Each structure stands twice: as C-alpha cells, then as structure tokens.
Amino acid sequence: MSQPKRAISDEAALRLVVEGTASETGTEFFRALVKNLAAVMGTSGAWVTEYLPHQQRLRAYAFWLQDRFVEHFEYDIAGTVCAPVVESKKLVHIPDRLVELYPSAKLPGLNAVSYLGVPLLDPRGDVMGHLSVLDANPLPADPRLISLFQIFAARAAAEQRRLRQETEVRAREEELSALLDSAMDAVVMLDTAGLVTRVNPAAERLFGCTAEDLLGENLRGFLPPESAAQFDGFIKELNAPSADRPQLWIPHSFPVLRWDKSVFPAEATISRFANRGQEFHTVILRNVDERLAAERRIALLAEEAEFLRESVRDLAGMGEMLGASPAMKELFEALKRVAVTDATVLIFGETGTGKELIARSIHQAGARKDKPLIRVNCAAIPGALMESEFFGHERGAFTGAATRREGRFALADGGTLFLDEVGELPLDLQAKLLRVLQEGEFEPLGSARTRKVDVRVVAATNRDLAAMAREGKFREDLFYRLNVFPLRAPPLRERGHDVALLARAFAERFARRMGRRLDPLLPDDFRRLEDYPWPGNVRELQNVIERAIIFSTGSRIDLNPAMPAAAVPALPPADAGDHADSPILSVKELESLERANIERALAACDGKISGENGAASRLGLPPSTLTSRMKALGIQRQV
C-alpha cells in the first residue's frame, strides 16, 4: 500500500481555497477548485459535478485525477458511491475498502480505496451536483480535513448557484427579446431625455429604417409639432406625483413621421418604468392605416364570400326547384326514384330549362351528396385540351405540361360528374369516355398507370342524341350507355302557372339583392307572362324579371320595357257585335306578326335601330330589347 501524502498547513490550505479560485469563474473556477482540493486533501482525484435529475446522471464540471484533468466525464449514478450522496443529501465518507463496496469505483490506473463526497444544494434544498475526492490510500475521519473539504464545497455551491442565476437571467433576457421581436406593434424604449435606447423589428418596419438609425435619436424628431406637444403632455401626466397608473392609452389618431418624413396616423400606448435607479418610457405604436386597410380587406372578402354564396344559391334555384305543374310533378317523382340509385342519367331539354339544377338535385338527394359534384361544360373546352381536362396528365405529357394535373374524373372520384352539353364531345373522346363509364378506369395523358375511379355520371344536352347517333355524329354505344334513365326538362311554355310562381320568386330575390321595396306583381302581369311562349325558358324569364326591376323607377314593377312580347301590339278586346267571328291568332302567327312589324320599322328607318329616328323609338322599345327580339326572331339588320 502506498504511503499517504503529507498534509499541508491550514494557512496554505485556506490560501489555496481563496487565492486559487478568486480570479476565475465558470469552468476555469471549477478546474482550479478541484486541483487545489486534491492538493489540500492529499488525494489522487477530486471532481465537482452538475446533477441531471431527469436522466439520473452526474456531469463533471472538472475532474482532476493523478495530476491531469479528465475531460467530458459523465456517468449514471445508479450503483455508484455517489448515489448515496445525491439521494441522502448528506456527506458520505468511506475511509477504506471502497472497491469492495462499490466495484464501479475502480478506475483505470488507480486502485481506489477511500472516498469523501458532499452534495451541493440550492437555496430550496434541491441537489445541484456534488463535490468528491478519492484516493488509493485510506482516508481517516480527520475533522480538520473534513472541515477544509466542506469549505471547498461551499465555494463550489456558491459558484454553481451563480452560474444558475446567470443562466436564468440570460434565459429571461432571451425571452424578453423574443417577445419584443415577435410583437406586431412597434416598441420604442426612451430614456428620461426622450432618446431612443431600444427598438424592436416592428419599429424598424414602421419607421422605414434600421435600429442603428433610431438608437440615440430623440423621438420628438419623429413627431409633427402638434404630436410633439401632445407627447410632452402625456409624459408630464405620467410623471405627475398624482398619477394613479403607469401607462396611458391614446385611442385617437396620433400623427407620426417616418424616416423619410412621410406621415402616418398611429394609435399609441405610453408607459413608465424604472430600472437600475433610472426612469424609462416605453412607447408602443400601431399604424392605423394598416388596420383600416385590413378592415377594408376583410369587408371585401366578406362581400366576395356573400357574392359566392349568392351565386351558389342562384345555381341551386334558391335551394330547390320550383314548380306545381303536372309536367314538374312528373319530373319530381322521377327524380326521387333515380336519385337514390347510382344509375347514369341523361337529361335532355331546351336551353334554359334548368338541366344543371336537375343534376344538382340528383346529387344532393343521393348517397354521394357529401362527395364532390364536378361540372364539365363539354362545349366550352377546346378539343385539344379536352382529354387532359377529363383524365389529367403527367408532367411533360405535352408541350406546356410543366406540372402533373388531376383530371375531372379523378376529382369526382366517389362523387358525381355532370357532363353538360355532352353532344358537343368529339368522336375520338367519346370512345375513351365510354371505356370509363363501362370499366371505371382510365390512363392520364403521358402515363402508363391505369387509374380506377368510382364516379356517377349525369349528362345533359339540348340536342337530339338519338338522331345524331343515326347520322353518325354521336357514338350509338355511348348514347345507350348514357341513356340509362332519361329525364326530360319540360319547357316553360308547358308548365302553365309555374310561370307566375317562378316570376314571383325571381322578383323577390332580385328586389332583395338590389335593396328595393317593390309591390307584388299584379294578376294582369301574370297573365301577360303566361301568354308569352318563352323560347329562352326559365333563363329568359329570370332575365326579363331582373330587367323589369332595373327599369322600374317606383315601387311598381314595370314589365313593358322588359318584355320581348311588348313589340307585339295588344289586340283590341273582342266585341261581340263587330268581332264575334274574328279568328284567334296562334303563337306562331303572333311571332310572324311581330317579325313583319319589326321589319317594316327597320325598312322605314333605313336599318337604324337606336337614336331619335331609329326603329326602337318608332316601336316604343328600348334599343336593347329590339336587338334581343331581332335575334330571337332571326331578323337580320339590313345596312
């Protein structure tokens, strides 16, 4: 067994405690401490640690062992001689036979025999770490050595507490900086003279300059004279002995100058605080223009959202289809039967009869109502792009295909695909459409991958697909595949009193949208509407009612300038004596009469429509109404 080292004097030991660590802090302090501790105690090793409670580990600040430092020393406390020190929070002294009691205490090159350890506690009594020594010789319980050891431990605990406080202060400063830096409003800190001592990034953006430009400047230099006078008054009010609160809110506009001397209105908060015996003020500024612009944007978005909601309501026929005629009742019954199935539906009928509304009703009443309804207007898509629109394409599939794109079938997967104007499909695409309908699969353009889809198809047309199939203009097999459940949208002229029902609903809707208070339509108005053949069907009726409301100047809806049939002079009432045998004119005869009357007026005016001597003035019609009737009756203007 090696001989114990000769102990140094008490005076030399205390000098090592005080002078050996006086000029050091942090890691260098702990390195000096353990080196001097080993010299004072006459041991082979000494170390001071930080305790990591969540990991149950000790991490050495410094470890002096056999005349050198051991770097990055860290270990679990379980099973070690240090565990009792941490767990009991008391000094632990093992004078001899250390390795027999704790085999883990055996270190390379050192046959440790003795150990002395003490916990380092914070003000709350929690373990921060510990200080230990060990030696290859027995370490008797010498009160003098233990007292010196505890002096070193007190110094180590004091430095560790200082480091923790320093870390906490640094963390609070970082939190404060992060809070200021993330604030949307400009924060400006001023000293008692009004000089800027600190600003956040929002202040840099608000003033249009850098923090370096602002620091040291007097805030009054960024205030117009009236604002500077207000600011001085606020500061005086804040600093008054009678002030009952340390901040003031300025809710009205407070003009402020940017770095380029442009002016913006601001809202401001001014507060007072003290730090290190000095008074400071904090000014928080918000650009009111930005808030007003945001409010305007919100209002605009709200208007757009309302417009979109109104558009959806328009498309959906105010949420439901209207009609009480036998033709509509028959249609409603058919809709109820087919909507609950997945059958393909072909809707045919004249333009303006509401075929898309029927398709929406089928979708909403079926099991797929929570899935998308995708509409494709087959007449509006160029032939070269139609296949990509239907089936999508991969990147690079053709010139201009810079990105991958999903087609309408993929978007409608699980839902409904509405093919409007299906009669306009080119023949080559009809074959590919037929495959999707029959097999439920397709390949996107530029891809060899087959994609499966589950789509219900509802198609609509105003053309005679059966005749087109016979003429070879439409694939016969596709026609029969679409014509699983045909639905006819009845024209308005076959719906009788539905005209009055729809006119009343349209009038209420447009009056509400335009903010007008209008009287209801009169019975004579309804009779006049029902007598017209409505070649444009529901869409034409809707346009007429909207046009009539626009033309109306009072509370009475005036149909005269809006009705296309106004061009036809009203027939005199039948007189039993003079006209008992007068023939009753048919609709076609009335149209022929109207056509001839317009043509005579155009001829008399040399083809001139508008103006003082135009045909419209001569007929007592607005020029737009006359042009619309000419188009409806197929009258060509002669120049």
Image (cartoon, rainbow, N blue to C red):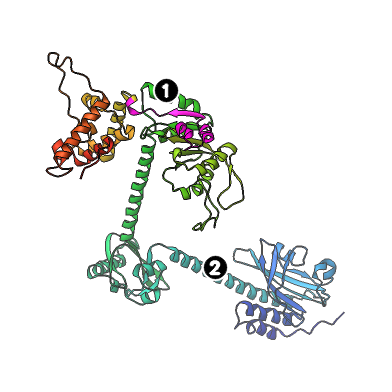
Residue 466 on the magenta span: yes
Residue beneath the point at 50% across and 42% down: 427
Q: Depth check: 322 or 105 in front?
A: 322
Task: Give the left or right position of residue 195, taking residue 413 as reference.
Answer: left
Mark 2 is on which residue type? Glu
Q: Position of residue 634 (x, y in %)?
A: 27, 37
Looking at the rendering, the stretch of residues picked out in magenta corresponds to 465-493
Residue 330 - label: 1
Q: In this view of the protein, can residue 316 be seen by the observer? A: yes
Crowd around label 1: few <14 · some 14–19 · many ≥20 (10 Å): few
Disc 1 or disc 2, which is closer to the eye? Answer: 1
Q: Are marks 1 and 2 in contact (CB under 8 Å)?
A: no
Q: Is residue 547 left or right of residue 73?
A: left
**Mark 2 neighbour density, 10 Å: few (under 14) some (14–19) many (20 or more):** few
Q: Which residue is mark 2?
A: 168
SS at circle 2: helix
* Looking at the image, residue 573 lies above or below residue 307: above
Q: Earlier in the sequence, mark 1 or mark 2?
A: 2
Query: Where on the picture, by quarter, is residue 505?
Result: top left
